[in-house]
Amino acid sequence: MNRFESAKEIYAKHGIDAEKALADLAQVTVSVHCWQGDDVGGFDSDDALSGGIQTTGNYPGKARTPDELMADIDKAFSLIPGKVKLNLHASYAIFDGNRADRDALKPEHFAKWVEFAKARNIGIDFNPTFFSHAMVKDGLTLSSPDEEVRKFWVEHGKRCVELSDYFAKETGYPCVMNIWIPDGYKDIPADRLSPRLRFKKSLDEILATPYDKSKVFITLESKVFGIGLESYTVGSAEFCLSYSTKAGIVPLMDNGHYHPTELVSDKISAMLAFNEKIALHVTRGVRWDSDHVVLFDDETKEIAKEIVRNDAIDRVFIATDYFDASINRISAWVTGVRNVQKALLFAMLQPDAKMKELQDASNFTELMVLSEEAKTLPFGDIWAEYLNRQKVEPDYLNIIKEYEEKVLVNRK
């Protein structure tokens, strides 16, 4: 008997079907962020990162062109099991001479990304880019009191809604379009309400753009603070959740965007009670929204458990969002996305039915013992079988090192 068969029998003794878990995980799509590959640089501007966005490190091999980024994404995807989508920011427009500002983006500026997605039979998710641009005035975009600035960014949002509709229709997969703005103030503001009312007005104007609501899911992402915006953030959790409910769009939680004592895993069930769908950006914050590579850590596992145990795989849009320039960027992609998938498989291999029964019976002693036992079941053997069935190499580091030696070190 091989290790997988032995592990499968052990799980079966706990009432857990390992084969079903493998089949279920194979159907889960993770949306993989493109911006890990080039440190959030994009291709539409040479401006420095702004709006609370920061990457640290200078590891060799950063993608400098669309072709290089696509090649690196391909290498990462070849080492990631299961289903994936490509998550793009608007700043990754490819112009080929027909340059346009962000308020005038058109499908032709993303045609090569659509061609890339179609060739790989994957979908595209999308994000307006409300940062790293000259029209970010005094740290404000959609909430700016300068009407010229506010209207510029409203037009950008409208173009992105149209582009999201284009991606969905061209690829045949739904497109999740996420709105996040960096707006806020470094010190205590005199007026907290007016910026939020302007943000609300701007969102109303963007959402008036026609789109196919069966194929495009617009989400709104909150944040607790940003670099240079420590005292006040316009798009707070309360604002974004309230607006999402009012407008009938999807709330998005990034687990780096809350106070250090807040856990997104604890919020998921509350959100599912009132929303048909929710969206997640899975990251790893270290004391703040530092966008570290996702690990197979407690909070990632708890997030996955809440999705799985609440039968919400089809109700939660899962995307990764981090950028580490201190290590090999392709390894960062593969490690982080695999850890999201690992956490989902780990959650699928929990004795949830029994644990819920024990909780309802107030049998907390047995519940604690069982939940601790589940942590040391032979999960690694099930994961190894998943990689084998998905035909991806379990040990990817040497493959990435070879790619680095042949390709990445030649980028100067």
Image (cartoon, rainbow, N blue to C red):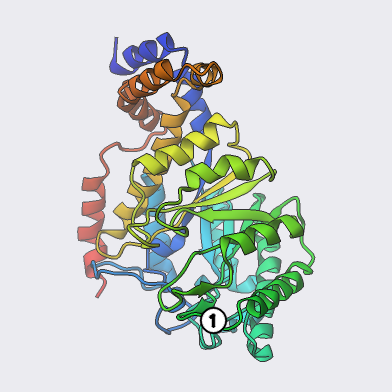
Count of labels shown? 1
For the C terminus, the quadrant is bottom left
- On the image, the x and y values in percent for residue 128 come to 59, 70
Q: In this view, does 149 lie above or below 328?
A: below
Q: In this view, does 98 lie above or below 410?
A: below
Q: Which residue is drawn at 54% across and 88% down?
A: 137
Q: Can residue 82 be seen in this view?
A: no
Q: Can residue 247 be seen in this view?
A: yes
Q: Nearer the viewer, residue 65 or 230?
A: 230
Element marked by disc 1? loop
Q: In this view, does 201 lie above or below 101?
A: above
Q: Which residue is drawn at 23% across and 46% down?
A: 397
Q: Residue at x 26, y 51 (%)?
A: 400
Name the quadrant containing residue 192.
bottom right
For the N terminus, the quadrant is top left
Per the image, the residue denoted by label 1 is: 189
- On the image, the x and y values in percent for residue 8 come to 38, 15
Q: In this view, does 41 lie to the left or right of 266?
A: left
Mark 1 closeness class: few <14, some 14–19, many ≥20 residues within 10 Å: few
- On the image, the x and y values in percent for residue 226 come to 44, 71
Q: In this view, does 295 lie above or below 116?
A: above
Looking at the rendered structure, the kind of residue marked 1 is Pro
Name the quadrant containing residue 228.
bottom left
Q: Residue at x 47, y 82 (%)?
A: 45
Q: Which of 243 and 358 is in front in this view?
A: 358
- On the image, the x and y values in percent for residue 54 come to 37, 72
